Image (spheres, helix red, strand yellow):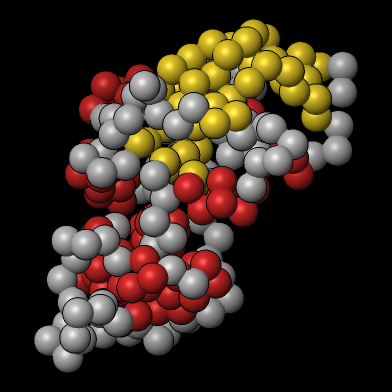
Amino acid sequence: MPHIQLHNLSVNYGRLEVLKKVTLEIPDRQIVAIIGPSGCGKTTLLKSMNRLLDLYDDVSLDGSVAIDGVDIYHPDADILALRKKVGFLSQRPYPLPMSIYNNVAFGPKIHGLNGWGMPKNAQASPSAVGRPTLDDCVRHYLQLAGLWEEVKDRLHSPAVKLSIGQLQRLALARTLAVEPEVILADEPTSALDPVSAKIVEARFRLLKTDYTLVVVTHILRQARRL
């Protein structure tokens, strides 16, 4: 079964029809790129997959979006669980007003994840007895986002002091730390320099072995690389 299924999905902002009867299947543990010119509805399509469209008053939606066979727009749907399961990376990163360390630790603390959200194959510190510590969690997800080596000596410095390329990777680490199954990325490299963009793309290619990634881009070359 595909991880995400959209069937006859239509979205309107007031009287403006943005999406019209979109039917799409997104496979598990793959990267799917959504490409197209500005204003064609790419971001709207992405936001429909974790109900971020609920934040807008003038949006109407018809059709269905199912994740693992469950309709996320059902009246009884658990929105908090959905947002944990489906992470979102915005075009421009917005760090929490706290340290690098606390940006990554924030999600596991709020969600009360067992073992601080660490996957079973993650390496715990020698002092940990059977259960990874919060320090292990922060280190693991910063490593997964390709940022650990650059920030390991300043974890308690304000996150806002990082470069924009580092902030985007911090946002990725923060997203991963709540153990999502799906990562939605809205033009995640458009504000980055070429070197930082290449690092983020490399991270995405590594992550697809464990996560489903849906990446919005208007760059055909990037879609091909991913």
Q: In the picture shown, does residue 37 fall above or below 164? A: above
At 43% from the left and 68% from the top, the residue drawn is 113
Q: Nearer the viewer, residue 131 or 15?
A: 131
Q: Nearer the viewer, residue 114 or 207?
A: 114
Q: Nearer the viewer, residue 156 or 136?
A: 136
At 43% from the left and 60% from the top, the residue drawn is 178
215 lies left or right of 144: right
Q: Quadrant of residue 219?
A: top left
Q: Quadrant of residue 214?
A: top left
Q: Nearer the viewer, residue 142 or 25?
A: 25
Place of residue 64 in the rendered image (x, y in percent of width and height, measured from the top left): 63, 21
Place of residue 121 in the rendered image (x, y in percent of width and height, measured from the top left): 16, 61
Q: In the picture shown, does residue 136 fall above or below 156? A: above
At 48% from the left and 48% from the top, the residue drawn is 85
Q: Specify the farthest residue to the front.
A: 76
17 lies left or right of 114: right
Name the quarter where the C terminus is drawn. top left
Say if residue 161 shows up in the picture.
no
At 29% from the left and 58% from the top, the residue drawn is 145
Q: In the picture shown, does residue 72 fall above or below 149? A: above
Name the quarter where the N terminus is drawn. top left
Q: In the picture shown, does residue 27 fall above or below 77? A: above
Say if residue 5 shows up in the picture.
yes
How many dots with numbers?
Answer: 0
Place of residue 135 in the rendered image (x, y in percent of width and height, measured from the top left): 30, 82
Q: Specify the farthest residue to the left.
A: 126
Place of residue 110 in the rendered image (x, y in percent of width and height, measured from the top left): 55, 72
